[in-house]
Structure formats: C-alpha cells, structure tokens
Image (cartoon, grey):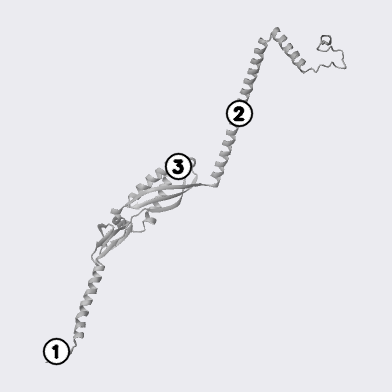
Amino acid sequence: MDKDNVLKMNLRPSEKMTRVLIPIAAVGIILLFLAFNSIVIVQAGTRGIVLQLGAVQPLVLNEGLHFKIPFIQKVIPIDVRVGKAQSDQTAASRDLQIVTTTIAVNFHLVPDEVNKLYQNVGLAYDDRIVAPAIGEAVKAVTAQYTAEELISKRSEVSSKVKETLASKLSTYYMALDEINITEFKFSTEYNNAIEQKQIAEQNALKAKLDLQRIEVESQQTIERAKAEAESLRLQKQEVTQELIDLRRIETQMRAIEKWDGKLPSVTGGVTPFIDANSVK
C-alpha cells in the first residue's frame, strides 16, 4: 500500500466528517450569499432603477419584492413622493421695479419614467433642474406685470407661474403638484412711494366724505327751514279773531285758578286784571 492510502485508513471518523462538511458549508455560504444578493425590496414611496453592467434598463421596479442577477444587476431606489422646494427669486416687473418673490413648490417624479430621469439628469435634479426652472418661471411671469398688479392680481400671477413651471418640469419627467407665492418684497423706495400714495388716497377720501357730510347737513338745514316756514304759514292762515278771543279767555281762566283771593297791597298805575268790585 502507498503512503496516501495508509493516511486515509488512519483518519478518524470525525476528521472524515469535517473534511466533507467544510466544502458543503462553503458551498452553502456561497449559495446564501448569492440568494441574498438576488433579492431586492423596493420600499413604499420609491421605485427601483435597474442597472445591468452599468446600463440603465427600461424596466422600473415597483414597490415590493423583486429578484435581480447578482453582480450583474444593481437596483437604485429613488423617491417618487411629493417633495418641496422653496426659494427667493429676484426679478424685474414690467415697470422696472425690483421684486423678490418667495415661492414654495411641491412636485414629484413621474414613477414610470424615473429611469429616464436618472439616465439624463441623475439624482441631483433639485440643483440641476428644479431650482433653475423656478427662477426662470418667476422671472418670465413677473416681467408681464407691474409691481402693483403683482399684488392686485396675485392669483392670476400664481396660475401663470404654475403653468410655466409645470411645462419646464415635465420635460425632465417631473410633475408639478402645487405652488404657493408666500410673499412679494419690493425696494424701500417703492414701499415709501406706496405709503405716500395710500396717505394721499386716504386724505382725498376723507375730504370727499367731509364734503358729502357738509352737503347733507346743508340740505338738512334747508329742509328744516322750509318746514318751519311752511308751519308758520299754515299757522298764520289758521289765526282768526275767534281764536284770539279764545286764547285770551283761556289765559284769564288759568290766572283765576292760580289766584289766592287776595288783592295786591300795593298797586301801580296799572289796573288789576280782575275787577275787585266784582268780587263779593
């Protein structure tokens, strides 16, 4: 017998088992590793972009469990939920006033086309696409309105900015959800001019109201005078000799009711209004 056969015959059973199990365990580990790398889970609110040897594949993975070829394919998750971008944009109005617009934008990536976005733009789409598109849209729309119109026609301005921005984002496989123009800021000189204009308008309105009040009061005075004159005229027409005699008798009757029955102790040249000889 040769030397190798002698060694094999002298091996213990445990050693034989170890020599058999080690290759099996190694194969098992390799298989587990391959299985682990063959499974990919796409989380909620995301999509999976498949790269095969570096090339973007047309298939976009939806949420859930998927299989890929280990070491050949790679899956890159990308968020398709609604995102927010907010910025301050400075532009010139139609009347050449400098306006700083604070705008908040809500948008999301088109889920079925994220592979095209990744291929053409990459993951830095906020800085490369969204921010410049917001600036261009705000500048283009602001130039169509005067500074005063930007405030008085705020909803119309917002609609135009939304329409312009949606068109720009759709080119890069993004969808615009909503925009909110939170503030318009103007230069100090323009703000002072607006304040002076408002003061002038308030003074003019006050003067107008004062004039209207004076006119109303004058008209009321005239109407009262007319009413008094008409009343006097009617009273004059109704005065007759019988009415005069009746008023005199009524006056004397009231005086008699108030008299205490005593004659004045001192009399002047005026005859008392009651004949003393008639009193018994």
Q: Is residue 178 above or below residue 74?
A: above
Q: Who is closer to the viewer here, 145 or 153?
A: 153
Distance (Cα) linking label 1 and label 2: 129 Å
Q: Who is closer to the viewer here, 246 or 141?
A: 246
Name the image quarter holding residue 121: bottom left
Distance (Cα) linking label 3 and label 1: 96 Å
Q: Is residue 2 left or right of residue 187?
A: left
Q: Quarter of the image containing the C terminus? A: top right
| Residue 79, x across and y down, in percent | 34, 57
Q: Which mark is residue 5?
A: 1
Quickly name the residue at label 2: 213
As drawn, which residue projects farthest toward the top? 241
| Amino acid type shown at disc 3 | Arg
| Amino acid type shown at disc 1 | Asn
For the question of whether residue 73 can be seen, the reply is no
| Residue 195, x across and y down, in percent | 56, 42
Q: Quarter of the image containing the N terminus? A: bottom left
Q: Residue at x 39, y 51 (%)?
A: 106
Classed neighbour count for the residue bearing mark 2: other residues with Cα under 10 Å, few (<14), some (14–19), many (≥20): few
| Residue 40, x across and y down, in percent | 27, 63
Q: Residue at x 64, y 12 (%)?
A: 234
Q: Considering only order in the chain, which callout, 2 or 3, is on the residue closer to the N terminus?
A: 3
Classed neighbour count for the residue bearing mark 1: other residues with Cα under 10 Å, few (<14), some (14–19), many (≥20): few
| Amino acid type shown at disc 2 | Arg
Q: Considering only order in the chain, which callout, 1 or 3, is on the residue closer to the N terminus?
A: 1
- Disc 2 on helix, strand or loop? helix
As drawn, which residue projects farthest toward the front? 280
Looking at the rendered image, the disc whose residue lies closer to the viewer, 3 or 2, is 2
- Disc 1 on helix, strand or loop? helix
Quickly name the residue at label 3: 154
